[in-house]
Image (tube, rainbow, N blue to C red):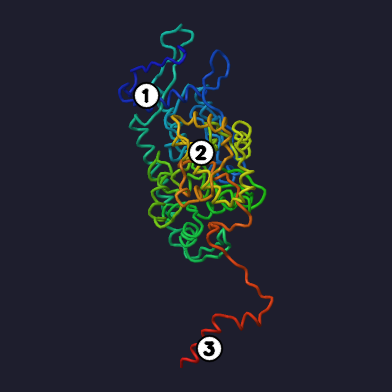
Amino acid sequence: TPYFDLEIQLRNPIKSNQISHVTGLNLLNSLCLFLPLGGQDCILEPLCFPEQLSDSVSLASSDDCCLVSCVFCSHLAPLSDKDQLLKHLVLDHKLVIADIKLIADFPKYMLYWKKRFTEQPITDFCSVIKTNSEGPAELQENYFLLCDVLPEDRILREQLQQKRLEEVLEQQQKERNDTSFQRTCMFCNEDFTGNRSVLLNHMAREHSFSIGLPDNIVYCTEFLDALERKLDNMQCFYCEKIFRDKTTLKDHMRKKQHRRINANNHDYDRFYVINYLELGKTWEEVLSEDDRELLKDDDDDWSDWQAHPVCAVCLFCEQQEENMEKICTHMQEAHKFDLHKLKTELNLKFYQQVKLVNYIRRELHQCRCYGCQKKLETKEEVVQHMMEAGHVMQIPEISHWDQPQYYFPTYENDALLTALSDSESESEGADHSSDVPVFPEDISNLKAIKQNSVLNKLLKDRGSSS
């Protein structure tokens, strides 16, 4: 709308060609977040509920409790509610501060400019931005942009960053040299003493849970406390869902490969030194670099993690559902395919289910009916043929699909495989296939067993030969 038409005036120390595209976008975003439109508040970006308010509070730094003062008046706001203060600056004083997240010490930054604005007019430091420059004069307003294009502002940000970095590196050095560290592993209850790196490396190698290299971590004790609180609350580290017990939580994290912390939870930022070294670079970037070095021998691959849950896709069409129950109901109603019935009738173990799903996907991908091996032009024609001929539940002999090649997913991101139910009688990570029979030992007649033992016969033969 014309209301957001911006015009940068050139009657100040900052020239228009010095303001980058990124700074301009940040400015526009800041204005859009707080400016009323037509006298009413508007939502100009997607809203979201806080994932876990209690955890966010517990993870917050103690510095977040301090109050930050407005640069023009006596208005105060807690550091943890920085947006409230920024909104006040825009609506009441027409001031926009660019790249807030790159300011290392926001309270000291505000105190500095509060003093400077009392010494000189604001136009000596800020760009003047006129809104609705081509509209009626009564709708035009002047806003002021404070950013690091101004040399004084850039020097201030660099000094605050340097001081913060020195404090963090000093704290990190204390933790690196600390030999009195003592803590119990949150997964196996094994005690570790000496140095924090012993515990962190243990969790990475033995439990496939890595929060990064020890040298990249600061405030380690607070970090581990926050993670243990999540486990005590039966909460997944990655998706942050809450479960009824630790057994269910453990099974969920194993199947969904959720043995990492949530990359979107910015409460973890303060625990990574990289966030103090390179402002603007996120901690998950260095975490991925560190894992390749630390876990080079680990078989687990977390590269396919996504920020949002992956839905299971139907075997026969493009329908997606959030869980196994819904996708099975869809396949049964829409395609007459009952996976639960096949599992019961064929007595399928977990890995046999995996191979069957991969087999069906591969056959349909190749436009071939797995019931009669008839090949057609498209997958849709195959599905229609199977429905008409009644071949949907006509699974071929087990020897056709119970093959090692079908351990490998037909589709790399097939979420249906992770949602398959695991048999309670089947141990994790083992496939007891039918071609490896296990016979129970009959101990009803121990005397007869000893007399007919192969070992007994071998001993007799050895004695006679000597």
Q: Which mark is residue 391?
A: none
Viewer-closest of 416 and 155: 416
Q: Amino acid at mark 3?
A: Lys
Q: Residue furthest bottom?
A: 466
Question: Mark on residue 460?
Answer: 3
* Residue positioned 38% across, 43% down in the render: 278
59 lies left or right of 174 = right
Indicate the quadrant where residue 377 lies: top left
Q: Dot 3: what SS?
A: helix
Q: Which residue in the structure is indicated by mark 2?
A: 372
Q: CA distance from mark 3 to mark 2?
A: 59 Å
Q: Residue at x 55, y 65 (%)?
A: 191
Contact, mark 3 vs mark 2 (Cβ under 8 Å): no
- Viewer-nearest of discs 3 and 2: 2
* Residue shown at the point (53%, 43%) measured from the top left: 357
**Is there CB contact under 8 Å for labels 1 and 2?**
no
Instruction: Decide which of tag 3 and tag 2 comes sooner along the chain.
Output: 2
- The residue that mark 1 highlights is 124
| Pointer 1 or 2: first along the chain | 1
